[in-house]
């Protein structure tokens, strides 16, 4: 299993879907699995039952996915690394890639977002800076590799991920559909 961690808006789902397609394995989104379980979307659940209740379900879902999902690309929620248990589960059960972006880039992408409960505040950029500062060390601790690039395109990020996995000997190049590194970063 390859797991993607990082801040909301950093491209985990978009990159994850394309990476999975390139490698030829299923794509799984832990937020989507959580929504199936709670029978609705995350924001109202979060507002009604609080962050702790959400985090409890998140831990259960991550543990189950690690145990049963097999070969796949897993996109996690931005706060999945907050609990040590989740970091351990992910680090020991998957190859973890941290998609790292600056709070300013994330803000550009998430300015109009209404789905993320933590960002429904008066100053979302300040919130993103605070979350980034708090979480960056946790993402790093959980991840095996950090993928970082200034305002990267999805295509570039997917290629960076493929290249990193190949260099580490974790991916058979013959399995990869596209030419890695075809586009300069
Ligand atoms: C959260 C990020 C969301 C979702 C929930 C909490 C967070 O996932 O899990 O709203 O704490 O940053 P994305 O990173 O996919 O937005």
Image (tube, helix red, strand yellow):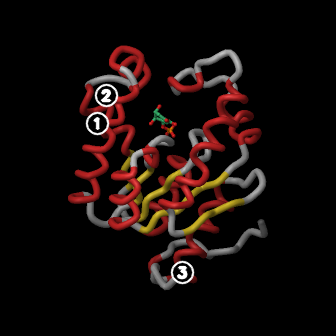
| Mark 2 secondary-structure assignment | helix
Please tell me how crowded label 3 is: few (under 14), some (14-19), or many (20+) other residues with Cα within 10 Å. some
Q: Is residue 178 above or below residue 81?
A: below
Residue nearer the viewer, 25 or 10: 10
Asked if residue 67 lies left or right of residue 152, the reply is left
| Mark 3 secondary-structure assignment | helix
Give x and y (percent) for residue 6: 55, 49
Asked if residue 124 lies left or right of residue 77, the reply is right
The residue lying at 53 percent from left, 53 percent from top is 138
Ligand 1 within 8 Å of disc 2? The answer is no
Q: CA distance from mark 1 to mark 2?
A: 7 Å
Please tell me how crowded label 2 is: few (under 14), some (14-19), or many (20+) other residues with Cα within 10 Å. few
Give x and y (percent) for residue 151: 76, 51
Q: CA distance from mark 3 to mark 2?
A: 38 Å
Q: Is residue 13 above or below residue 50?
A: below
Quarter-wise, where is residue 147 in the image?
Answer: bottom right
Give x and y (percent) for residue 31: 39, 38
Disc ID at residue 37:
none
Residue nearer the viewer, 179 or 51: 51
Residue for badge 1: 57
Q: Is residue 138 above or below residue 171?
A: above
Ligand 1 within 8 Å of disc 3? The answer is no
The residue lying at 69 percent from left, 49 percent from top is 101
Is there a contact, CB below 8 Å, between mark 1 and mark 2? yes
For the C terminus, the quadrant is bottom right
For the N terminus, the quadrant is bottom left
Q: Is residue 56 above or below residue 50?
A: below
Residue for badge 3: 166
Residue for badge 2: 53
């Amino acid at each position: 299993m390859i797991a993607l961690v990082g801040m909301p808006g950093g491209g985990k789902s978009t990159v994850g879907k394309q990476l999975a397609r390139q490698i030829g394995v299923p794509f799984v989104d832990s937020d989507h699995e959580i929504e199936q379980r709670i029978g609705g979307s995350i924001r109202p659940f979060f507002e009604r039952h609080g962050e702790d209740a959400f985090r409890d379900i998140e831990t259960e879902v991550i543990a189950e996915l690690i145990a049963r999902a097999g070969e796949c690309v897993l996109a996690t929620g931005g706060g999945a690394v907050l609990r040590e248990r989740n970091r351990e589960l992910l680090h020991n059960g998957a190859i973890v890639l941290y998609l790292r972006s600056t709070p300013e880039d994330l803000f550009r992408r998430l300015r109009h977002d209404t789905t993320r409960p933590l960002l429904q505040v008066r100053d979302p950029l300040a919130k993103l800076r605070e979350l980034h500062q708090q979480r960056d060390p946790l993402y790093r601790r959980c991840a095996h590799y950090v993928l970082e690039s200034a305002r990267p395109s999805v295509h570039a990020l997917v290629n960076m991920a493929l290249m990193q996995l190949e260099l580490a000997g974790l991916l058979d190049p013959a399995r990869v559909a596209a030419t890695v590194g075809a586009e300069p970063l």
